[in-house]
Amino acid sequence: MIKEFQFGRLTLLACLLVTAFCALGFRLVDLQVRQHEILTSEADDNTKRSALREPRRGEIRDIQGNPLATSVFVKTVCADPTLIGDYHDDVARILAPLLRERVDTLAEKLKPRILRYATNGEPVFNQYVVLKRKVRNETWAHIKSAMTNVAAHVPIKELPRKERRFYHNLRHAAVFADRREDQLRVYPNGGLAAHVLGYVRTEEDKSSLETRGQYGVESEFDRYLDGTKGFREYERDSRGRELVTYRRADYEPTPGMNVVLTIDSGLQYIVETELIEAWKKHTPLSVSAIAVRPRTGEILALATLPNFDPHHPGDFQLDTLRNRIVADSYEPGSTFKIVVVAGALNDGAVTLQDRFDCEQGVFYHKGVKLRDHHGYGMLSVEEIITKSSNIGSAKIGMKMGGERLQKYIRDFGFGERSGIQLPGEIPGIVNPLKKWSGISITRIPMGHEIGVTALQLVMAMSAIANDGKLMKPMLIDRIENSRGEVVPPYYFPTEVRQAIKPSAARQMVRALKSVPRKGGTAPQAALEHYTVAGKTGTAQKPVKVNGRYRYVAGKYFASFCGFFPAADPEICILVVFDEPKNGYYGGTVAGPVFQRIARRAAKYMNIPPEPELLEQLELTRLQDAPRTAQRN
Amino acid sequence: MKEMEDMPLDERSAPAPGVQVGTALRVFCFCVFIGAVSVGYLYQKNQLETLGREIRAKETELDRLKTLNELNRDKLARMQTHRYLDMKVKQLRLGLVEPREEQILRLEEAPYASVSRTSARRYVRRSAGAEVAQEN
């Protein structure tokens, strides 16, 4: 039988238990219901993490598939100065050679500082210092390994727990990589085709570091090169390790598309190395060259000096970054004669055999003198091209009339943007007929009173090489996804218009073939194994003097634009010098550069030599052989 | 059985003394079942954890290999550049020069043409099963 005092004890115990359970229940309700939201968010903050996954930026490749711009993932190396304590000098000494930074600069960054919140002015220790951005993964591995040797002389195991923790943090947590993934844009060829490729810069926000194209193809095709970000939501354990089981969302990033250019890095290299040699000889303000396939309008090489390194565009003057081939216009000089003569031949206003009086080098029109560099008498249209007579071309222009000349200027693509896939293209300057002065009809045929871009000029010459068909310049061959499939938009050779009839174009080619020959203005542009057709240009450069533009002696644009083999053109090349020294004629300054580029390009492109020229050369060699033997 | 038949009726209907075997067996089975389920659950949980760690390790390894691949691709790209090859030719004093025209033996083949127009070109599918174009 239960005694009375036992019953009392039991009742007391029961009451205590009930009270305890009630208290527990209350706490449970308090935690689970009343404080649910606060605690859930706290718990989520402690365990749940979400991370944006950066897509790899697409590559820019040349026509052969060689990468011209590619990306590698890199780290942003950061430090928490509060975990470094008095070891900032030691850490700086270890990191400086790896990060290629000065020791004192790093040591300064690593010193703990007190910052204040901008909002409430509360003091806070600076726990995030960026030591260096864009650090390659292998360097980061070296840094991690080097950091484990900080304070190596300290016997950590003998230290109290608090100090042991400090040294552990110093070695393993004080220097860390930013969680946000970053990419380094790598241009394996350095500055090769820098004006075409452009450059990128990194835009930073709280959750990501984004690589954005700033110029050139990088900027123009940024939306294709830039892939789609991935996303991952996960939980982590107390040590910060990811618990894969609790991944909530995991979306793989989609890599950016690869942009394949029509540029051939081999040809581009040939062009650039020859331009460098020419630069050394003539020290111009700038020199540019562009190589185009006339049949398709594909741009095979496009280079301008001075050049820049797309890895460090900030180290160069703004002027250097400009792609002068599309963004600068200049008075083309005699190379523009191709337009007036081609137009006149197309209209039937003249034939190649028609003769014009070139007035022995001095011709007055509306009381204004027009001069030739040499005095010529009667010249045929073909000879006007060969000798590059200003008076002859002015007379052809006058015979044709301003309206027709204006039409052909437009038909050859001058005065409008060509639509090349590069930023900053300008239309050039073509005045409307009503704005022409009385002497414009004599000046425009010789390439004055007009502003053209180098691209427009080479495309016009390509049109002559291509039976009169003006093609749209083509810089992009295709866009591929990461599996190598071609994706829209598709790029194909596009004919803009038939600028002149094929028969007129063929006559024009015949005339242009005489330029790089003995008696022409550019014998130094001729090739041994191919017939070259081309035209020189030497134009005085207008310079601003006392607020007005005037032609100044000694400042010229010298150019040569030609194509070969003349019968079946494979490549059209334009070389333009801005203010060359040691000579200024297009034929003597730009002609030899054209020749060297063309000779190397022909071998690179495996263009078969013309059999007639090859036979002639063989014959000459055989004839010379006995003489050489006799001499020896 | 024979013993049971010989027993008086009132003795047979009385409850047997001690734990009944059948009930004990059932309880035992139930406990084993609960135990097995619990152990199974823990085992599965452990497996998930182990596999999760394995996945993470493999992902880390994949990332490492991707990085290595990137580095190698970058290195290869640099080594294939004309500038690097030119530099190497000069450095190693190979004395390579461009061939003269008479040194070149030309076989009957197509002249230089852009790769895209001569090699197979695969276009992305516009929609499932519909190839947009195929150029060879």
Image: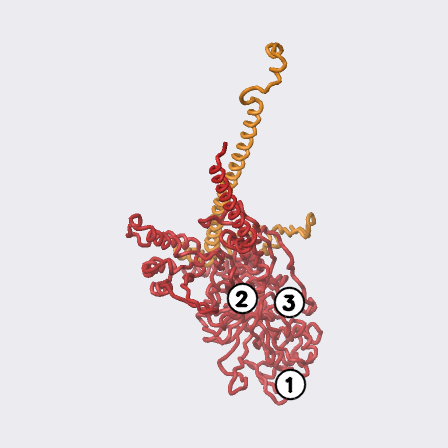
Percent position (x, y) of residue B130?
70, 49
Circle 2 chain:
A
For the residue labelled by badge 2, is the local secondary structure a helix, a strand or a loop? loop
Of badges 2 and 1, the one in the foreground is 2
Left/right placement of residue A338 relative to residue A170 reads right
The amino acid type found where label 1 is placed reads: Ser
Circle 3 chain:
A
**Label drawn at residue A214:** 2
For the residue labelled by badge 3, is the local secondary structure a helix, a strand or a loop? helix
**Chain identifier, red in the render:** A
Q: Is residue A603 above or below residue A558?
A: above
The amino acid type found where label 3 is placed reads: Ala
**Label drawn at residue A579:** none
Q: Is residue B19 above or below residue A26?
A: above
Q: Is residue A503 above or below residue A90?
A: below
Residue under pointer 3: A463
Chain B pictured colour: orange
